[in-house]
Image: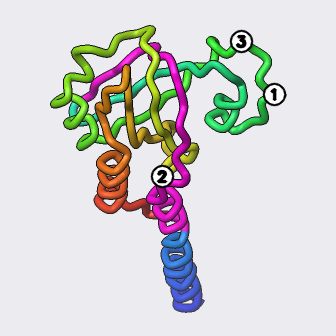
């Protein structure tokens, strides 16, 4: 009986591991496609730099833009747009590019940015990724570089699921 239970447990574990590889693949495929990053104009609320990445906190001017980040329809948003702060992740290599381009020295709270961001998260995290940032017609992070670095980050940090 113990042998049978052990075999069933091992088979369940193998099936779980093999079936969960599909979730990572779905996330990577989606977040690797430039068509899944939308262009927004957002106002900077705050920038938090961490050891090798950064988080950009922004507000949007319309509930249509905000809704996907909160996972609801715009009709479910009952507060003023300025009360919905969205957290956007800047992966380490993109953080390096932004630093080299002087982004952190120039950009401050209240500045309006044009950015491209995913409306999906990776690995059930709590943030969305930025693939490009433009301010006053200056490209601080190009879409090509930003997306390539997000893809590389996902390859290096594969989800168990």
Give the mark toward the camera: 2 or 3: 3
Q: Earlier in the sequence, mark 2 or mark 3?
A: 3
Cα–Cα span, label 2 and label 3:
30 Å
Which residue corresponds to the image point at 37% horizontal and 45% vertical from the top-left?
143
Q: Is residue 114 left or right of residue 71?
A: left
The dot on residue 123 is 2
The dot on residue 158 is none
**Callout 1: helix, strand or loop?**
helix
Q: Quadrant of residue 148?
A: bottom left
Farthest front residue in view? 137
Q: Earlier in the sequence, mark 2 or mark 1?
A: 1
Q: Is residue 60 above or below residue 8?
A: above
Specify whether residue 150 is painted magenta. no
Q: Quadrant of the N terminus?
A: bottom right
Cα–Cα span, label 1 and label 3:
12 Å
Q: Is residue 161 above or below residue 63?
A: below
State the residue position of label 1: 76
State the residue position of label 3: 80
Which residue corresponds to the image point at 69% horizontal and 38% vertical from the top-left?
71
Residue 102 at x, y percent in the picture: 20, 23
Bounds of the magenta segment: 23-50
Tell me if mark 1 has few (under 14), some (14-19) or many (20+) residues whose alpha carbon lies within 10 angstroms of its own: few
**Callout 2: helix, strand or loop?**
loop
Cα–Cα span, label 2 and label 1:
26 Å
């Amino acid at each position: 009986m113990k042998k049978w239970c052990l075999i069933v447990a091992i088979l369940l574990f193998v099936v779980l591991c093999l079936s969960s590889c599909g979730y990572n693949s779905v996330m990577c495929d989606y977040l690797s496609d430039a068509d899944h990053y939308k262009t927004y104009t957002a106002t900077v609320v705050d920038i938090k730099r961490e050891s090798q990445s950064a988080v950009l906190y922004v507000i949007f001017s319309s509930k249509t833009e905000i809704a996907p980040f909160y996972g609801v329809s715009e009709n479910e948003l009952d507060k003023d747009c300025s009360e919905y702060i969205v957290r956007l992740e800047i992966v380490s290599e993109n953080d390096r590019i932004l630093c080299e381009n002087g982004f952190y020295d120039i950009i401050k709270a209240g500045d309006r940015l044009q950015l491209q961001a995913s409306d999906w998260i990776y690995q059930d995290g709590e943030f969305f990724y930025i693939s490009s940032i433009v301010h006053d017609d200056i490209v601080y992070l190009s879409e090509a570089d930003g997306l390539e670095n997000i893809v590389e980050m996902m390859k290096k940090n594969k989800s168990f699921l």
